[in-house]
Image (cartoon, helix red, strand yellow):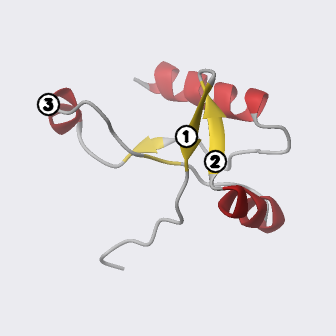
Amino acid sequence: MDEGRSLLRSEIETFNPGIQLARDPAWLSNKETRAKKKYGSILIELLDQEVTKKVLEQERIILAGTSYRVYNFIPKYI
């Protein structure tokens, strides 16, 4: 599991110039829930505020050769 998240982090940082993650990506759902779905969401935390702003303005990142939409994550409960 951790190896997969590290690989995902490496992929994001390699194919999205200027992006550095603060930590490995995290799934927003548990393994059992993801197994029943076609798609899932991951949480990425960027190191730099300016890069974060740029990524949110572009609304896209590249992962495994595919462009994916990004959103600013606001938790329901703080």
Counting residues from the N terminus, which is met first, the one under dot 3 or under dot 1? 3
Q: Is 71 above or below relative to 35?
A: below
Of residues 78 and 70, the one drawn nearer to the viewer in this rendering:
70
Amino acid on which the number 3 mark rests in the picture? Lys
Q: Nearer the viewer, mark 3 or mark 1?
A: 1
Residue at 77% x, 61% y is 54
Say what secondary structure mark 3 lies in.
Answer: loop
Residue at 71% x, 56% y is 58
Label disc, if present, on residue 60 of the rendered structure: 2
Percent x, y of residue 48? 79, 60
Characterize the local packing of mark 3: few (<14), some (14-19) or many (20 or more) Cα atoms within 10 angstroms: few
Say what secondary structure mark 1 lies in.
Answer: strand
| 44 lies left or right of 14 | left
Label disc, if present, on residue 6 of the rendered structure: none
Percent x, y of residue 21? 69, 46
Percent x, y of residue 37? 20, 33
Counting residues from the N terminus, which is met first, the one under dot 1 or under dot 2? 2
Q: CA distance from mark 3 to mark 1?
A: 21 Å
Q: Which residue does the numbered mark 1 point to in the structure image?
A: 68
Counting residues from the N terminus, which is met first, the one under dot 3 or under dot 2? 3
Amino acid on which the number 1 mark rests in the picture? Tyr
Label disc, if present, on residue 36 of the rendered structure: 3
Characterize the local packing of mark 1: few (<14), some (14-19) or many (20 or more) Cα atoms within 10 angstroms: few
Determine whether label 1 and label 2 are within 8 Å by CB.
yes
Q: CA distance from mark 1 to mark 2?
A: 5 Å
Percent x, y of residue 75? 38, 71
